[in-house]
Each structure stands twice: as C-alpha cells, then as structure tokens.
Amino acid sequence: MVKNNLKIIMDSRHIGIREMARSTGLAINTVSGLYHDTSKRVDLETLDKLCTFLGVAVGEILEHVEEPPQE
C-alpha cells in the first residue's frame, strides 16, 4: 500500500492547509484531500509543487509499505 506522509510533514513544520494552498497555488480542496489522506489520485504537477515548497523528495511524501497480513 502507499502511505501518505504529507500530514506528518506539514504538522512537524506547523504548516496549515490554507497556508500550503496559498504558498503552492494548489486548490484548498486538493491540499485538504491529501492532508486528510482521502485523495485517490495525485497529479504529478501537484507532487512537484509540494516537493518544491517543502524541499523534500516524492519518496518522503509518499512511500510504499507492506500491507499488514489480514487475519
């Protein structure tokens, strides 16, 4: 599964959803969906803007982790 770390990164830097949207030019709904991990898809341009603003690599925002075994 793909784990979204955007909330962790934003919270650790005390960046709110509105501030991120204003600073990146992304729609507040886009940032909110990613922050709350409700988005099903992420546009490459969106990832580029987030990475540029935060100074991180894509792999720091999104990472692939093993799914826990289902019982």
Image (tube, rainbow, N blue to C red):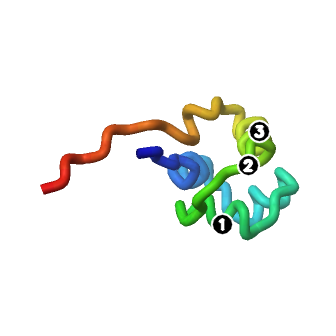
Amino acid carrying label 2: it is Asp
Percent x, y of residue 3: 46, 46
- Quote the CA–CA distance across marks 3 and 1: 17 Å
Position in image of residue 25 (x %, y %): 87, 55
Residue type for callout 1: Ser
**Relative image position of residue 37 (x, y in whole percent):** 53, 61
Residue topped by disc 3 = 48
71 sits left or right of 32 in the view: left
How far apart are the two marked residues, 1 and 2, measured between alpha carbons?
A: 14 Å
Residue at horizontal 58 percent and vertical 50 percent from the top: 6
Which x, y percent locates residue 1? 41, 45
**The disc labelled 3 sits on which kind of residue?**
Asp
Question: Secondary structure under badge 1?
Answer: helix
Query: Between tags 2 and 3, which lies in front?
Result: 2
Q: Which residue bears the numbered disc 1?
A: 32
Residue 43 bears which disc, if any? 2
